Image (cartoon, rainbow, N blue to C red):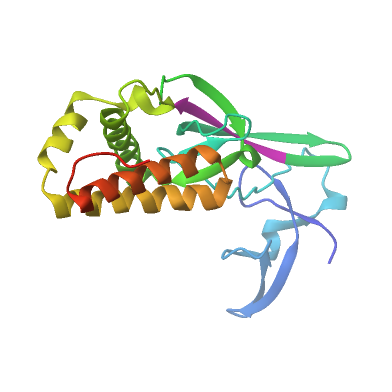
Amino acid sequence: MPPLITREKSPIKNSKVTDIKWLDDRYVYEVNKSDGLFVESGLQLLSEYEGTVMEQEQIDIEYKFFFGDLVQVSGYGADLFKIVGFRTEIWRYKEDAWEDVIYELSRVSDGEWLEAGEEELTLVADAESADTFIQKLGLLYLINKQQNPDKTSKLQNTIRKAEFEEIERKKEKKELIDYLLDIFNDYRILYELFHDQEYYHVMRVILRKLESIVNNDGKSHV
């Protein structure tokens, strides 16, 4: 079937007939596999049309990340970023065409703004669990700081007064053990994904803390 233009809708556009049906004693035409049907008077051969034809293109974009997702960025180590926006750049040339998805990020530790492509990002936690994950990092840092007062950490910027109060409310032995095991599992997953020694070190700190709690002596064992 040769290319046609549709005249029943504005603007006039280039189309192709994808099916022909017999309805109410006349032929009707399906165009571009759409749900609508056109009568013959609403169509014209493209070769016979002398006006301007509007070319339209439908683009389906699949986004891998969304607002609030917690991610890591290639080249930024263990730093965590939140997605605050994204856009699609559409590139068209005579012999080539592609789309780029660009994500706008805010670093959790200091709010630094960054742009990155989809291929540079790795999902750590989705938007629903991102805040809980960040809070766990802060609580873990506070426990470690109490054991090693002179040791610094990349996570110290996430510590808040409310997190210290949360530790105080979790003095009961079983609750604290369960909470530390939960954090340990999160870091184990991160270590298996990225093989970053910082995550392995944190896992060892948690195990030492668990040992001290189980022994009920309140001291850290190296």
Decide whether residue 198 is among the magenta residues: no
Where residue 23 sits in the image (x, y, percent)? 60, 78
Say whether residue 12 is left or right of residue 180: right
Say whether residue 102 is left or right of residue 205: right
State the residue at coordinates (78%, 36%): 92
Say whether residue 1 is left or right of residue 81: right
Task: Please tell me which residue lies in front, 57 or 176.
Answer: 176
Q: Main secondary structure of the magenta part?
A: strand
State the residue at coordinates (77%, 37%): 52
Where residue 221 sits in the image (x, y, percent)? 32, 42
Above or below, 192 against 27 in this view is: above
State the residue at coordinates (83%, 67%): 1
Where residue 193 sits in the image (x, y, percent)? 55, 50
Task: Please tell me which residue lies in front, 214 or 13.
Answer: 214
Within the image, what quadrant is residue 44 found in? Answer: bottom right
Above or below, 151 against 57 in this view is: above
- Which residues lie in the magenta part? 99-108
State the residue at coordinates (69%, 40%): 99
Decide whether residue 106 is among the magenta residues: yes
Above or below, 182 against 141 in this view is: below
Q: Where's the C terminus, which quadrant?
A: top left
Where residue 134 sits in the image (x, y, percent)? 34, 37
Task: Please tell me which residue lies in front, 119 or 20.
Answer: 119
Within the image, what quadrant is residue 30 found in? Answer: bottom right
